[in-house]
Image: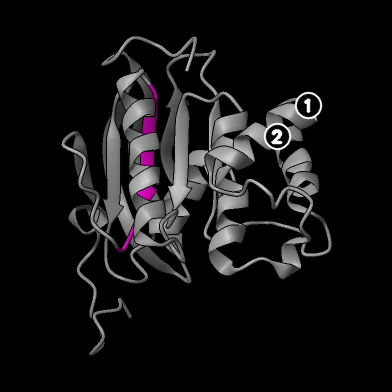
Amino acid sequence: MSSLPPVNSPLLSISDLACERDSRVLYQSLNITIEAGDLWHVKGRNGAGKTTFLRQLAGLHPVDEGEISLLNNNARVIYIGHKLGLKEQLTADENLTWLAGLNGSSTQQQRYIALERVGLRGYEESVVAQLSAGQKRRVALARLHLCKADIWLLDEPFTSIDQQGIADEQAWLNKHTLAGGAVLMTSHQDITLAQVKVLDLSHWALQCSTNEHGDIV
């Protein structure tokens, strides 16, 4: 990917970040700097605030306390949530046209190439309602290959994806970070890349009780 910053240059600063939900503090005093080349696996129990944390970084959830600052004014961010935001009645290409429009414009050829890269060659004009759960996620992930961004925020990108698809995704993560991009992602599956770092939100959580399933209550 072109125009990415040099590896190890700072991209994003998170200072004294806190999150409160339903009058309960999920995490507080979280301080971290995201650098070019970083791959962060965001972990924590169910209810620890992993999705909320990514949404805070994306500017989609209010910051209760602290500050999130882009350290590179030219840095661009893509957020792909667990809820994909696809319109079931539109085709894969039509959905990708809309998603790409959030970051700029695209041509049909560019969209078809992006869909091919995620394994959806031949499904470009298929209505999303007729696709499997894994194929729907691939439509959303095709945006990574279409829209140039420095920072990828990915909430459970391996969900409903087969083993070969997960291997393909890890290859994309590897290429992006080695080229100077950064990734923060949640996943219930392990990430096997050597450069992965772990950000466990429990380190910044108040002492909370849990139920028999390990969920924070």
Residue lying at 36% horizontally and 33% vertically, measured from the top left: 14
Q: Tell me how the rendering is colored.
A: one colour
Numbered mark located on residue 111 in the image: 2
Quarter holding the C terminus? bottom left
Q: Are marks 1 and 2 in contact (CB under 8 Å)?
A: yes
Please state the horizontal and vertical placement of residue 177, each as a whole percent of the image: 33, 26
Q: Is residue 154 left or right of residue 212?
A: right
What segment carries the magenta color?
181-188
Q: Amino acid at mark 1?
A: Thr
Residue lying at 74% horizontally and 28% vertically, measured from the top left: 109
Q: Identify the residue position indicated by label 1 in the image.
A: 107
Compare residues 34 and 88 and report the one nearer the observer.
88
Q: Amino acid at mark 2?
A: Arg
Q: Magenta span has 28?
A: no
Q: Main secondary structure of the magenta part?
A: strand
Q: Is residue 64 visible?
A: no
Compare residues 198 and 49 and report the one nearer the observer.
198
Please state the horizontal and vertical placement of residue 137, each as a whole percent of the image: 56, 57
Please state the horizontal and vertical placement of residue 178, each as a whole percent of the image: 30, 22
Residue lying at 43% horizontally and 34% vertically, measured from the top left: 67
Toward which corner of the image does residue 180 lie, by quadrant? top left
Alpha carbons under labels 1 and 2: distance apart: 6 Å
Please state the horizontal and vertical placement of residue 90, each as a whole percent of the image: 82, 57
Compare residues 144 and 167 and report the one nearer the observer.
167
Q: Magenta span has 182?
A: yes
